[in-house]
Amino acid sequence: MSRIFQKRGRDKLYIIAEILEIAEETKGVLKTQIMYRANLSFTQLNDYLSFLLKNELLMKVVLDNKEVYKATSKGIQFLQHYREITELLRTEKENAESVQIEHKEKIKRESTK
């Protein structure tokens, strides 16, 4: 099986997409909400927020005297592309598994002849 299909922990792109999904849902989310919902430590959160702000995927705005984070149009575009790619990979994985099952069934039929 290809490495890309192996189950692993969350990678950086997954976490970035998760943060952007959280930040796209509302008018804006607090830093602590992102931290808890994305299951990140404070240090990890700050690193990701810094990266996302620097690359203009996320913006910080003041709403009701609180700093909140929102996904930018660039961030939403990234998220759309990420979803498309993960769907392609999921479909490819399903196709590969289907071929593998068919192959095993064929071998089993041939061995019983």
Image: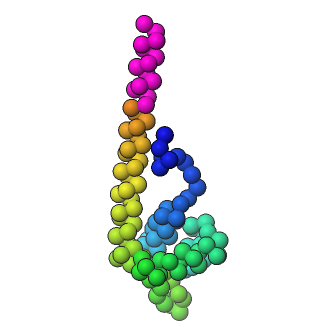
> From the viewer's perspective, is 92 left or right of 60?
left
* Residue 69 visible in the snapshot: yes
Q: Quadrant of residue 33?
A: bottom right
Could you tell me which residue is drawn at 41 percent across and 47 percent down? 90
> In the image, is residue 58 above or below residue 103?
below
User: What percent of the width, then of the height, locates residue 87?
Assistant: 38, 52
At horizontal 55% and vertical 48% (from top left) the residue drawn is 7
Residue at the outermost bottom position? 65
Indicate left or right for 69 with 81 as reference. right
Q: Main secondary structure of the magenta part?
A: helix
Expressed as whole percent of the image width and height from the top left, the position of residue 101 reads 43, 28
Could you say which quadrant of the image residue 31 lies in? Answer: bottom right
Q: Which quadrant of the structure image shows residue 27?
A: bottom left
Magenta residues, as a range? 100-113
Q: Which of the pair 66/72 is nearer the observer?
A: 72
Give the residue at the far front of this rendering. Answer: 2
The vertical placement of 66 against 1, above or below, is below
